[in-house]
Image (cartoon, helix red, strand yellow):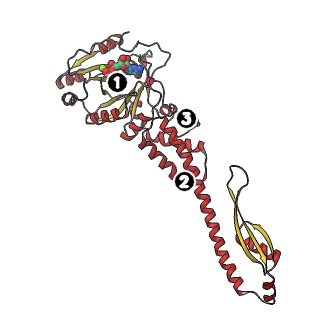
Amino acid sequence: MEFFTVKAPTYEAAVRKMREQYGDFVKIHSKKIINKRRFPGFSLHTEVELTGYISNSDVNSGIGGVNQRENSRINVEELLSELDTVKSQLALKEENRQRKQSLIEKIGKTLQKNDFSPEYINDLCNRLMDDEELVSKNDLLLLESKTLGFIADSIKIDTAAQKSIPKILVLMGPTGVGKTTTIAKIAAIHGFSHNSSHNKKVAIVTIDNYRIGARNQIETFGDIMSIPVTTVNSPLALDGFIKEHADSDLILIDTIGKSPKDQDIYDEMQRILSVCASNTKFCLTLSASMKSTDMIKTIDRFLSFRISSIILTKFDETEILGNIISVISRKQLPVLYITTGQKVPQDLIYASKGFFLRTLKGFAVDVDQLTFGEFGAEKPSIDPADNSIFDGDGQG
Ligand SMILES: Nc1nc2c(ncn2[C@@H]2O[C@H](COP(=O)(O)OP(=O)(O)O)[C@@H](O)[C@H]2O)c(=O)[nH]1
Ligand SMILES: [Mg+2]
């Protein structure tokens, strides 16, 4: 008995080839599927190798007619071969999926290093896994661009208030986050511009429901900028102040809340602020160095104050911002300003998606080459070359 092998892309083609070369009495002894990669990095190439033989008895008994049993055997073999083709296609698909998964896991680790929350990472990786375009292309740069796109989408920016600042802006938040300093920066930018055509009439009022005299700091700021600063501790007094300054373009309300755990302070503050009309924007000020859990607790605590924007301070004190992005995305609160230091007024910028994305570490794609979202909105509110009015704490 003589054995021989043929190779072809499919089982049918291999059978055909074998018959052409060795005649109709050929019998298939065994079959092998060979997966080969032609070039490194290219997809797998499948080949079927058949080993066949011709038995003399078959040749003798089969002379003059077709062997029926052999024919039906070939049909079964053909079906089996189709099954094999489907199996190898599925195997290829699975291999692609696994490769995509391992790239996404890599992205997950990068997000972890940037301190994004586990929920945020999980949600983002699931979205990447479901992305159809990524099934066919195992391209890390494309994956990174998509990731940055999803992150950009998850960040909300208060562009409306950036374009047109509301008449009354209230800054709330825990003690020490930088409310008063930020008020001074905003006041300086709008009311103390070197370019007099930009000057607005600005007034500052502090709600001090402790009467602890912490108003010296803001009064110092006000004196330097020639901006009137007043302290009130009742709804009537605040109402009087707002009426008195009806001709102001911008009224900034600073608040003093000593212990965020004391509910009475919140009730009192709410009572005083209840006189603010609809032209008031309540902003919650959070420090970038706060822990995520504290940020979430603080947001929940202040939501009853009609908070519609976030101001993030002390970005100079932290390099990793995934935790903040996770929180603001979860709470769906838009960011208005970002502060980056103690210098008044330079260290204040408008928040932008680009600003957040540029802080992310471990991505190879160039954020400035991406074209989605509101990029380029991050214009410094004041020319950084301007001399500072004072460095922090109103010390001049
Ligand atoms: N590093 C840094 N310090 C800041 C920033 N903003 C405010 N501060 C400082 O944080 C401290 C508390 O600020 P303050 O405005 O009094 O906070 P408030 O209690 O929320 O009014 C002061 O020493 C400020 O100079 C900032 O963006 N970066
Ligand atoms: Mg203060």
| Element assignment for label 2 | loop
For marks 1 and 2 on the same chain, the one whose residue lies earlier in the sequence: 2
Q: Which residue is mark 2?
A: 132
Q: Which residue is mark 1?
A: 177
**Label 1 CB-ligand 1 distance < 8 A:** yes
For marks 3 and 1 on the same chain, the one whose residue lies earlier in the sequence: 1
The residue type indicated by label 2 comes to Glu
The residue mark sitting in front, 3 or 1, is 3
The residue type indicated by label 3 comes to Gly
Q: Is residue 34 left or right of residue 113?
A: right
Q: Position of residue 110 (x, y in %)?
A: 52, 38
Q: Is residue 377 left or right of residue 177?
A: right
Eyeballing the image, is 183 above or below 58? above
Q: Position of residue 45 (x, y in %)?
A: 70, 59
Q: Which residue is mark 3?
A: 362
The 10 Å Cα crowd at callout 2, few under 14, some 14 to 19, many 20 or more, is few
Q: Is residue 196 left or right of residue 228?
A: right
The residue mark sitting in front, 2 or 3, is 3
